[in-house]
Image (cartoon, rainbow, N blue to C red):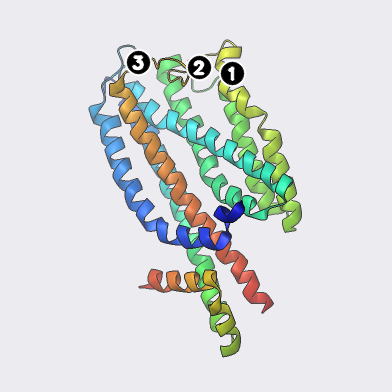
Amino acid sequence: MFDFFRIGKIFEISSKLTKYVFVLFIIVLTIGLTEALFLSPEDYKQSHSVRIMYVHVPAAWMALGIFSMITFLSVGTFIFKNKKFFLISKSLAPSGFIFTIIALITGSIWGKPTWGTWWAWDARITSMLILALFYFMYLLSWRIIENENNAIKISSLIIIVGAINVPIIKFSVNWWNTLHQGPSIKIMSDTTIHSSMLIPLGIMTAAFALFSLLIFLMKFNTEMIRIKNKGLDRL
Amino acid sequence: MNGYGLYVWSAFMFTLMSFASLYLITKLQLLKEQKKYIIKFGKLNEAKAAVVREQKINKEILLNTIITKI
């Protein structure tokens, strides 16, 4: 069942894939930036400030997506006692954290011309800030806990507790009256965003996903070499 | 951009700078570990080095390090 997760195989693939992902990321990002900054139309209400959406929304999606993936992997670590899951989640976390910070900062920049304030203690924004704190605690647990087994247990627990926050972020705009607008892109019903904006948004999301993959591959290789370095010490 | 240029450009610049910073930090960490590995591998005697070279992952690390240096 876990043959796909064979560490040797993943390392072989990840070390070869990095340069191709980097080139693809640069190409997709260039197209995305051209579309987002110059070709996409301005909004009838928000004018050109709507362009911030092309970095804010993909960053928020990626931050939540990566946190959800890490949650599943952390549960897997506990159930199957499989450390390989953990190595993958540890490599995913840095990009997830950066995406959360980007979502918060660009959201704040977008908030000023739209709402007239840089920050509001509103349900969506506050729950995103809590997500950033959980990412930070996860990364910090690796820095401060020296025993690897303890680090695995504590960091996995942090993520599993933090997972409670994920549906709160998603449904905060439906459950409470917030400054933040409701979802424009829905899976179960019609999307309320025009294709001239939806296409650049899709391209930018693809670029962000490729960046996340690139960082994951590099981080995974680093972790693998670190393990092998410890192995050389024991020889 | 109808007066919104400062907001739009600063949001995009912040995003790109965050990407560049994370990429550089990750790349430097990778290079540091590769360098450490090569130093440790260089200190091994012939018999131990041969054992290490037999493992697929070690082969891959050595190959990648050589390519990076080229």
Residue matched to label 1: A172
**Residue drawn at point x = 76 percent, y = 53 percent:** A150
Both labels 3 and 2 in a single chain: yes
* Residue B20, disc: none
Residue lying farthest to the bottom in this orientation? B46
According to the picture, the residue beneath numbered tag 3 turns out to be A46
**What distance separates the C-alpha of mark 1 from that of mark 2?**
9 Å
Q: Are marks 1 and 2 in contact (CB under 8 Å)?
A: yes
Q: Amino acid at mark 2?
A: His
Residue at far front of view = A1
The chain to which mark 2 is attached is A
Please determine if labels 1 and 2 lie on a single subunit. yes
Q: Looking at the picture, which amino acid does disc 1 mark?
A: Ser
Q: Do the numbered discs 1 and 3 sit on residues whose CB atoms are within 8 Å?
A: no
Q: Amino acid at mark 3?
A: Gln
Disc 1, SS: helix
The relative height of residue A17 versus residue A213 in the rendered view (above or below) is below
Q: Chain of mark 3?
A: A
- Describe residue A109's horizontal placement relative to residue A160 as left or right: left
Give the quadrant of residue B36. bottom right
| Residue matched to label 2 | A180
**How many residues crowd around disc 2 within 10 Å: few (fewer than 14), some, or many (20 or more)?**
some
Residue B62 on image: x %, y %: 48, 74
